[in-house]
Image: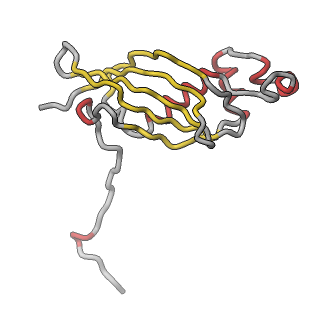
Amino acid sequence: METMSDDAAVVGRRIAFPEHYWDDLQVGDVLASTGITITEAHLVSWAGLTGDIVEFHINKDFAAGTPFGERIGHGPLTLSVALGLTTQTGYFSKVVAWLGLDAVRASKPVLIGDTIRAEATVRETRPTRKAGNGVWSLDYQVLNQRDETVMTFTSGFLVAMRPE
């Protein structure tokens, strides 16, 4: 029977995302997310959560008669999923505040069954007047499984700087 020496035993290691500070991203860096397949449950849950109950999102028969021919995802759902997917990259552990959105454009519908992912390119990094924080401005591109852009937007974040 094999035995393990005491110094070879590893017990209770905690593995987590590394902390990322404002200083860890530079202009031009791209944060690439994993993807998620949008389901009917996403549309129904979003409609119920937000009150955005519009027929072409939740009524299959009604949506069949629209130019899209089927139900489409809510634009704000697509935007929120893209922000969430990008957060999962681990680079947002030191965000102090979300500063907002600009230039949101929905260029193609997201259909039930589409798999979307986000790429966020760092547009700007700048320190703030208050020591210890900086701002990231990120240009988002949301893509479907065919690498077609379905949405673009810019978002800003106040992020803690690495302690000296």
- Tell me if residue 56 comes above or below residue 162 in the rendering: above
Percent x, y of residue 68: 78, 26
129 to the left or right of 144:
left
61 to the left or right of 121:
right
Residue in view at x 25 percent, y 21 percent = 126
Percent x, y of residue 142: 54, 32
Q: Quadrant of residue 29?
A: top left
Q: Nearer the viewer, residue 93 or 106?
A: 106
Residue in view at x 45 percent, y 38 percent = 88
Percent x, y of residue 24: 26, 36
Residue in view at x 31 percent, y 20 percent = 158
88 to the left or right of 10:
right
Q: If the image is split into quadrants, where does the C terminus sit?
A: top left
- Tell me if residue 161 comes above or below residue 7 in the rendering: above
- Tell me if residue 160 comes above or below residue 143 in the rendering: above
Q: If the image is split into quadrants, where does the N terminus sit?
A: bottom left
